[in-house]
Structures are given as C-alpha cells and as structure tokens.
Image (cartoon, coloured by chain):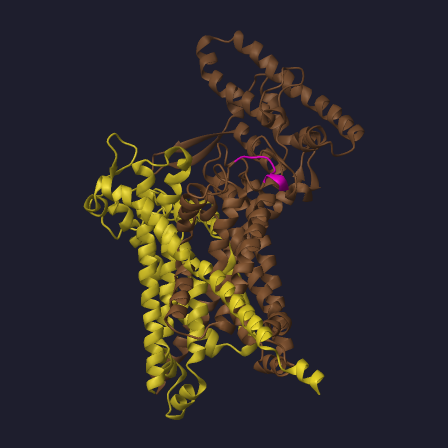
Amino acid sequence: MKRRKIVDWVFSGGAYCAVAVMVAFLVLVIGPVFVKGVGAYVFRGTVENRRMMLEQFGRGDSVAVLAEWAEVRRARQPVYDALRAFEREMDEMPSARRKELRAAFKEVKEGVAELLGPEPGTPLPALTRRIYGQTRWDRAKVKRAHILFEEQWDYSGGDGVRVLVPRAPMFEGTALALVFAVLEKDLEGLLRPRLRFYPQFLTDRSIDAHFFGGIGAEVAGTVYLALGAMLIAVPFGIVAAVYFQEYARGGPVLSFLRSCVNTLAGVPSVVFGLFGLAFFINTMHVSRGKSVLAGALTLALLVLPTVIRASEEAIAAVPRTYKEAALSLGAGQWRTILTVILPAALPGILTGIVISMGRAAGETAPIIFTAAVSVGPLVGLGDVLSHPTPALSWNLYNMCTEHEAADEIRHVQYGMALTLVMIVLALNLAAIFLRARVTRRLKG
Amino acid sequence: MRFAREQIVLTAGERRRRRAAAWAGRAVLFAVTSVAALAVLAIIFFIARDALPFFRQCGVVRFFASNAWYPTHEPPQFGALAIFCGSLIVTVTAVVIAVPPGILAAVCMSDLLPFGARQVLKPTIEMLAAIPSVVYGFFALVVLAPLMQDRLGVSSGVNALTASVILAVMALPTIVSVSEDALQASGRELREGSYAVGATRAETLVRVVIPASVSGIFSAVLLGVMRALGETMVVWMASGNAAQIPKPFFNLFAPVRTLTATIAGDMGEADQMTGSAHYHVLFAMGLSLLFFSFLCNVAGEWIVARQRRRMRGG
C-alpha cells in the first residue's frame, strides 16, 4: 500500500517537473534574447555615438554635440601625445628592448584607434566603422580590456587556460604608462557614456554592414514577405475551406484532396525553398533571380495548410442553426455562405491567418533561395515584384555566422532576434485574444 | 393570382440559369481547392524532375552507400551516407530527449493541473512553438555552444548533442500539445472507472489512460519526428556541419551534417550552379526528405484510421 502511494507521488512529481522544465526552457531561451535584445534599443551611448548620429543621420543638437566633442578632444589629447612621445622614445631604445616592446605597442596603438577613433587631423579611414570610436559603452569597456591586458594561454595544466596579463608593467617608466593610467581611471571622461534610447533602431538603415544604424531594411523585408504570403494564401485557403466544409460530399476525390493538404503540411520547410527555386524562379520566371514575390509565393504554399485547417475549424464551429435559419428564410447556398457563415466564422479565420502570418515572418529556409539577400538597401513597395530583400530571419543567421566581425555586433544580432520574436509573439498574442473572444461569443 | 405565381415559381429558363450558376460556382470552388491541394503534387514533381539528372549521372547506389562527400573536388563525389546518418542521429536523439518529458508534461496538464493553470499553460506552450527556428539556432550558437565548450570541456560546442537538445526543445510543444489533446479525448468515464476499482492516480494514468490514448500519443511523436527531421536553421547553425559518421556512432559530441543543413548551405550560390551535378544532388536530398516526411504522414494517417475503426467497433 505504502509503495503504491510513493509511486503515485513520484509519478505526479515527475509530471510537475516536466512542465516546470518546459517553462524553464522557455525562460532560458527567451530570457537572454529579451535582456540582451533590449540592449539594441536602450544602451549607454558614448560621445562617438552622438557624433555618428549627427553626421550620419542628422539627429541631435549639433551645437551641443560639437561643444562636447571639443571638450572630449581636449581630454584625449594627452593620450595621443603620449603615444607620439613613446614612438620617439622607442627610437632611442636599445634594439633588444625595442624589439620586445614593438609588437605590444602596435597592439596598444591600434586598440586606442579602435576605442577612441582615429586621431583628429590624420586622414579619415575609408570604412565608416573606423571613422568613429566605440559608440557603445559596453563595447568600449571590452576594447579597453584588450588594451590593458594581453590574452595568453596557459598550457601547463594540459588544457589551455586563458590568462589575462596586464600590459602596464611592461611599459613602466615610459611615456606610454600615462595611456594605461588614463584609460583605467578616466575612460568616462574620454567617451562620456550617457543612457540612450534608440527606438529608431527598428526603422533606421544600416551603415557599414550593421556596425551602426538599425534594421529598417530587414524589418521591411519581413513585413513584405509575411503580408505578401498571406495575401496569396488567404483567398485560396478560405475558398478551399468553404469547399471542404460546405460543398464536398465525400468520395475518393475528396479524401485524395484532403490527404494532399495533409501531406503539404508535412513538407519540410527547406523543400519549399527548393521548390520555390525550381518552380517559381527557374520554371515560371516570376522574376529574374530572387525576389520578394517569389519568396511570398513560396511562403504562401507553406502556410496554406494552416490557413485551410483554421478556416475549416472556424466554419465548422458556426452553429448549425445559423445555417438552417438562413436556408429557411429562402437564401440560397451562396448567399448563406457569404452573408451568414463566413461573417460568423470570420474571427476564427482571422485567428488562423494571424498565426500563419507569424509563421511566415519567422521562416528562414524557404526564403534563402527565393527572396533573401544578406546585404541590401530598403526595398521600395514598387520593387517587390523584382527585387530580393534582406529579412530579419535570414540576416540574423547571416550576421551571427558569416559576418566578418560577428563578435563586435552581437547587440545588433540580439536586437534582430528580439524584434523577430516580438513580431511573432505579438501576432500570437493577438490570435489568443481573438480566440478568447470567439469562444465567449459562441458560448452566449 | 397570376402575379403571385410568377413571384414564387420560377420559369423553366430562370431555373436552368440559376442551376447553371450554382454549378459554375461549385466548379470554381472545386478548381481553386484543387489548385491548393494539388500544389503538393507539383512540389513532388518539380523536386523529382531536378533530382533525376543527378541519379542518372551519378547513380543511386553511390549516393546512398558511400560517405565520400566531396562536392567541389574534381571529379566531385556525392556519397551522402554520412549526411543521412547525421540526420538520423540528430532526429533520433532529439526525439529520445523530447518524448519522455513531453508525455509527462502532457499527462500533468491534462490530469494533474487545475483547469485555470491549464488555460494559461496551453497558450504559453503554443507560444514556445511559434518562436522562429532561427532564434533557437541563434541561441544555440551564441549561448549554448560556448557554455558547453567552457563547462563540459567539449572541443567544439557545435555538435550533434547541441543540435539535438535544441531540436528537442522545439519538438516539445508539438508533442505536448497533441498528446494532451489525445489524453483529454480518452474521456472521463475511463478515469472514473479506474478510480472506482481502487487504482491510484499513477496506476490510472499509466495502466488505463495512456494505453487508451496511445495512438494519439504516437501521432504526437510522429509529428515531433517530422519537425526534427525537417528543421533546417537549428541544425545548420548548431550541428557543426562535418560530413562524417561519428566514431563511435553514438558519440554525440562529434559534429555532424544533416540533409536539411546541406541543402541550405550548399544552395547558397544557387544562381551560379543551376544545372550542375552539385545543384541536382541537393534536389535528390530534398526528394529523400519529402519521401521520409511522406512515410511519416502515411503512418500517422494509418494510425488515426485504425483508431477510428477500433472506436467504431467498440
């Protein structure tokens, strides 16, 4: 008896644990994406950020920014002077010591250029990312650590262990010592971090492969693709649902069509991409190469089964009495469907549409070969028929695997992930509320 | 009198006209529905059409039996055995990880939790299912893989296990949601009968409720398999993409390469390689994926049909 009770407890406990684990997974995945993704919209921006915003986007109070920039330049001058002085000092050193210090000095000098930007007065670098110093305070602190410490690997214990060795002692007594001291104590004075809200991240163009600016082109691409897919899939989906629910009378043809729809639902998403490439682009030539249109057509096929099923469920949930009342008043089948059944089923159909739209917005594999490009300008509404577009999902992949400096723009990646998740979750939340309303209304 | 009669009774011509209109409407509906439904046949046809040149050129046996995958060598070799194995390993591991907690969670939701908690949990789980796979892949690559590398001392954080764990998390919501529906559908009388003869809750669930809804649970597992097998972004980002069979084959810390990831990764320069054997081999892989998912579908439908027959038989 006692054993049975214990087994019972263990079983129930395990079941509760399973649910807890699942919720924990949700928090674990969404948590970092949310916390760090917010960092793309709200962060501590340095004076470099304000300068970049002014010069590239024409935002901010130009007088104030320029005044601040002048102050900061004065504060930075000792650092640049120290670098210069050390270069002169190095020329007079014994060659053994010079050799020893040269590599380290080169790293420090490059580090300073990355942290604070090029020294005023020197020719401007070609890449926009090099024109400015670190625009974000969190990145600035990382760069400072690269200057202050040298990363070494200790293999004495077998596996390599990362050790950070301070560089300052190496340069003790030279002019460069000042640089380390200033960077350690007064980095805030050199960069002036201030909290910055950057909601325009959502709509701004990107500058220099996402080093600066926002994700406007990607957001627009995702919206085009999702809306386009729905525009194509919804008419087909609703018509098919009406046919299945109101017209079809069984038989082998119907069951064949039904299993076709079921099979379509099970096709892997990457196969849709292959099909889009082989059919829409290489056979139908809807566009020369990838385009938003080809991507939307492919995504439409992908969400079609979901739209059909949701619409069918919504139509089936309309009480029989509605239909019978309409028919008894003398309305024909057409009129009954158009004026009674579809309006009554509309919220349910909308729920399905909204959920499918979230799916279309989040899919990556089908658009790789049909619509997505890694870098591209914002696509205008007139170009959707012929131009490929960047999209949130594809560019998130591309930026965290293939971008030359993926580590430096993690905040943009997190921002993209957060934006994508938010778009999808918002659509799903809307669907949940819609569904709750439908159930309430059908109940009474 | 004549006036009213004309209003109610249609002339023969009018009746014919209306009947023709109804018939035409029906035909249009049927045509549109057919287009939507038959799209899947077009998919199979076009994938097969582009896969055939590969089989004709390079042979079927080499494709399935050799694991020399050197598509860019001269001459290229297209042995996909290692890639099939990669897909198999990742899918099976993901399902093995996901099914036990999935069924337990479904049991918990249908039989243990109060109604209110279920009302909250069910949409939450649907949300979990809605998160785009590329975000899961991003999480695997940026958060999970470095963590594994640092904590477990694995040489590379992107390997079969990372991909499987994330796939399992992605398959969980589907498995839970569908099994929960199946458990709910098995009915109250069954449970009450079992309690009435003195069984505990665990005994009722394990011996009565779960066996009664086993076909629904099985289709849930099949859906999970299909989701894991067809998933692209996560495996592409988190599995390591090395076309080799791990040694030994159960070494989950080895990087693997899957069908979906190969298609997505190698088609990158699709525009330039249209028509080459490398292009067609990817369609051959797509065709294999289609075939597997079709098998799963048929199995699923067979189970549902069998269950329906059984229920009807009493």
Q: Residue at x 68, y 28 (%)?
A: A190
Horizontal placement of B264 versus A221: left or right? left
Horizontal placement of A55 versus B310: left or right? right
Q: Residue furthest top?
A: A92
Chain shown in brown: A
Question: Quick one: B31 or A48, which is closer to the camera?
Answer: B31
Q: Residue furthest front?
A: B2
Q: Residue at x 39, y 49 (%)?
A: B235
Horizontal placement of B242 versus A384: left or right? left
Q: Residue A372 at x, y = what percent?
A: 50, 41
**Vertical placement of residue A16 versus A158, above or below:** below
Question: Quick one: A378 or B109, which is closer to the camera?
Answer: A378
Position of the C terminus of chain B, as image quadrant, is bottom left
**Vertical placement of residue A348 versus A130, above or below:** below
Q: Residue furthest bottom?
A: B196
Q: Colour of chain B?
A: yellow
Q: Residue at x 37, y 88 (%)?
A: B199
